[in-house]
Amino acid sequence: MERIIQQTDYDALSCKLAAISAGYLPSSALQRLPADLAKKYTQWHREYLLTLKKFSRRAFGKVDQTMRSSFPVMNYGTYLRTVGIDVAILDFLDANEKVQVVNLGCGSDLRMLPLLMMFPHVRCVDIDYSDSVQLKNKILRENGTLRNDLDLSEDSADSSPVLVDQERYKLIACDLNDILKTTRLLNTCTSGDIPTIIISECLLCYMHEKESQLLIHAVSAKYAHGLWISYDPIGGSQPNDRFGTIMQSNLRESRNLEMPTLMTYNSKEKYASRWPETLNVIINDMWEVLNTQIPEIERKRLRSLQFLDELEELKVMQTHYILMKAEW
Ligand code: SAM
């Protein structure tokens, strides 16, 4: 199961590359990227994919194929999840100068690169299963652009489980189901006094209820001031809503993959109830994010990229994904 879960990262990567290729990402306006970094954003992702080919032709083939078969509705979804999370990060950075960003289940996400370049006082910590971060570590060190922009050496001098151990960037191998190891590593690599952003982007949906709740409670208790940003699918709670059950059976049949809590936390309210009541929680589905948080000028830009015929399908999909922000 662990291996199957790790491979979901290739879906996330191919969706991101497809959205970049079709011009949805980057959004210079909302991700607040200066022109040089907007150009780099595209370059980092392309070079990551090309370097992935050197280490795993199979993974490259999968990502490349999925990327090429992407539809406008999927590009909208990737755009919304990426920009939604980035805007939440940037708003927190507006209010706090020295911040650490901990990305749980980071996969191939490269959002640490613009953050490290744009904000000199930000530190980033990426955590995923050992196999996933070992591959990410090899790619970051092999590719000249990624290596230089992260100021890494070509050889992997740092030892497991901290594969990159820099002052401002750490790449850590850890099974997040192991709460003792997770908290021990966070105690070593982060500080409880620094304002902290925790990201879980399509992570909790693959974890079992007990382990995910332990993770949420242990990690949010660690930091004096924080913001937890979580993005996940929800199964749907209306009597005739079959989105979640269909999604579960499709995943089971096609990949032997489970989303154990999709129907437990099947509404926005139930999903938000996973965080301690004392936190200030805001939760939106992604259809609400599109219609209330993306300015009209940006929506017009998106409409100009590809013809979107399937508006009803977009609505059904996006009402079944949420962006949750819990601040304390
Ligand atoms: N967050 C990244 C993104 O959105 O681009 C990757 C998302 S991918 C769908 C899910 C990631 O969570 C995978 O990289 C997987 O290995 C990681 N993951 C799931 N369960 C995990 C666990 N128990 N410990 C560490 N990583 C985990």
Image (cartoon, rainbow, N blue to C red):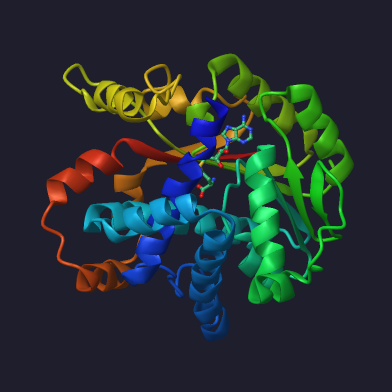
State left or right for residue 294 relative to residue 216. Answer: left
State left or right for residue 322 relative to residue 229. Answer: left
Residue 240 visible somewhere in the drawing? yes
Residue 32 visible somewhere in the drawing? no
Q: Position of residue 180 (x, y in %)?
A: 80, 23
Q: Is residue 230 above or below residue 194?
A: above
How many numbered discs, if any? Answer: 0
Q: Quadrant of residue 118?
A: bottom right
Q: Is residue 189 above or below residue 154?
A: above
Q: Whereabouts is ligand 1, in terms of quadrant?
A: top right
Nearest the eye: 218 or 288: 218
Nearest the eye: 73 or 230: 73
Q: Position of residue 227 (x, y in %)?
A: 64, 44
Q: Quadrant of the C terminus?
A: top right
Q: Quadrant of residue 185?
A: top right
Q: What residue appears at the point 26 percent right and 56 percent down from the top-left corner?
A: 69
Q: What residue appears at the point 69 percent right and 58 percent down from the top-left corner?
A: 138
Q: What residue appears at the point 49 percent right and 70 percent down from the top-left corner?
A: 46
**Residue furthest toward the bottom?**
36
Q: Position of residue 197 (x, y in %)?
A: 67, 47
Q: What residue appears at the point 39 percent right and 41 percent down from the top-left corner?
A: 284
Q: Is residue 57 above or below residue 47?
A: above
